[in-house]
Image: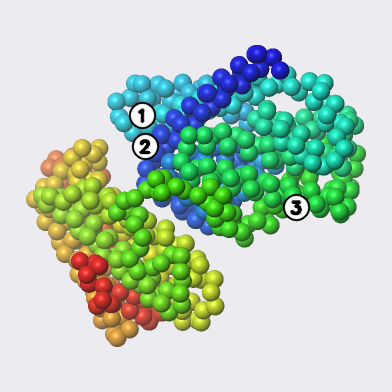
Amino acid sequence: MSFDIVLGLLGGLALFLYGMQMMSSGLEGAAGDKMRGILERLTSNRILGVLVGAGITTIIQSSSATTVMVVGFVNANMMRLSQAVWVIMGANIGATTTGLLVALDVGALAPLFAAIGVFMTVFSKKPKVGYYGSCIAGLGILFIGMNMMSDSMMPLRDWPLFTEIITHFSNPLIGIIVGAGFTALIQSSGASVGILQALAMTGAIGLSDAVYVLFGQNIGTCITSIMASIGTSRQAKQTTILHLSFNLIGTVIFTLICMFTPLTEMVASWTPGNAAGQIANMHVLFNISTTLLLLPFGNQLAKMAQRILPETQEEIPVSSENLPLIFVDVHNISSIPIAISNLRKEALIMLKMCETNLLNAIEMFVGANHDQEKIKSREKRINFITMEMTNYMTQVSQLNMNDVDTTTCNALYKSYADIERIGDHAINILQYSDSKSDQYLTSTELVKDELMQLKELLEKSFSLLLRSRFDDSEYAFEKISRIEDRIDELTFAYRQAQIDRLKNKKVSANDCVVYSEIMTDIERVSDHIMNIVEECQRCNFALFNDETMKEQIA
């Protein structure tokens, strides 16, 4: 191996790691909680997560790039390990489409990405634009590094020793090692599979031997995500273990199947005389079958990665936002009745925090002096509880429950989603009261009066929701329903009044747009309260009614 190859490899690795760090920092600064929320929704369901991973990989034609992005998301705390596993599974499926679609050479656009990102970072005075620029530039530099490493290894394709080894190995283990090693060197499973197909077309290697090299290539592609995790958080490193574990398990299973069953002959019979097609078919079969096989065990794979590489005490973030829950022990379900009771109590805690955030945000328009950082911290706590409760309720739902318990759990699950959305709307309203924001609303006396009327109606709805017994009467349901209708009427009227003020040049166009957005947020909050009430009515139980919790919600 010449000095030029070593130099190119080291230079490419340096650019790759620097680009990864830039992209991760940019993602964290630009996206924040909003991006985390989008990813939560896209990957909260295992099927959606797999589809997201497969879709991204199909578009950019690089499973390595997809897994690198996942490592970046996890490192930026925008994706959890239990979500990353589904995206990684999908990335392996997406990698099989390379031979079926027209190649999209993302690497060729890398200099353009880098240039655009650098210009955005250097010439823009807005911090958010700078974050986006850092993200785009990091992505470009990352691909430049990948291309540089791949180009530096290109001469190995014609290396006689490599061809000699690959055509004369004597057992499956050597084939797996050769496939893994070569793919790790050239940093592209697609290119590595292409070389294997070319060798097979010349007759240098048959499918019965090529399959083991192919399985090894799936392991070798993990080296990219391993390098991406250098210098990242422990959770990001656990993501690479997930990726490696997935392909190792698939390789072991398929190696044993190919050794002791006629699978290779069966795959060869699908496209007789087409060696390249046979390898492509086996590649598709390997990744799709492994994904389907391991899909039910994704959470177990995540836990295994955490056991292999546990967090040290120093790495576990300690803050008021992710302290253990008050009532629910996420590691112990105990009994179904106790679990449901505790879930109801945690729901009350969340709802009370959402009410506080919402009312504080509205009050800031009339001059109230509330701590914005405290409101934002409370919102992070709400998101943390939602995440913990979703995982906990998944475990509870797997138990043997009667129809009543099942209905109650379903109602609670939907209620948690509505409560979390109320918290999001409170944060939306908060940003409009910030004079430093581009979407700041200038509060006139008329606007203040209108907002305070809506606030009073919302307070009544929360009061009824938190303190009434829905299993005793229809009163609370009817009362909240009337309040919801009144809020709809008022928000419509107030929007029109603001438009009239705009026509009379009493407010700016920005004020008119922002005020309409606030009305929408308030309408949505009222709708979510109604959704919760309807769930309570449907299953006929008092979701929020427990005198023992007054201390916790004070």
Q: Residue furthest bottom?
A: 472
Q: In front: mark 2 or mark 1?
A: 2
- Residue 504 is situated, as x and y percent measured from the top left of the image, at 13, 43
Q: Is residue 13 above or below residue 524?
A: above
State the residue in front, 375 or 426: 375
Q: Is residue 542 above or below residue 185?
A: below
Residue 29 badge: 2
Q: In front: mark 1 or mark 3?
A: 3
Residue at 20% across, 37% down: 436
3D distance between C-alphas at marks 1 and 3: 47 Å
3D distance between C-alphas at marks 3 and 2: 42 Å
Mark 1 and mark 2 in contact (Cβ < 8 Å)?
A: yes
Residue at 42% across, 22% down: 118
State the residue in front, 349 or 461: 349
Q: Secondary structure at mark 3?
A: helix
Point out the image quarter for the C terminus.
Answer: bottom left
Q: Residue furthest top?
A: 3
| Mark with earlier residue (1, 3) | 1
- Residue 290 is situated, as x and y percent measured from the top left of the image, at 70, 52
What residue is disc 1 on?
130
State the residue in front, 62 or 491: 62
Residue 268 badge: none
- Residue 376 is situated, as x and y percent measured from the top left of the image, at 27, 50
Badge 1: residue crowd in 10 Å (few <14, some 14–19, many ≥20): many
Q: Secondary structure at mark 2?
A: helix
**Residue 59 in view of the camera:** no
What residue is disc 3 on?
253
* Amino acid type indicated by mark 3: Ile
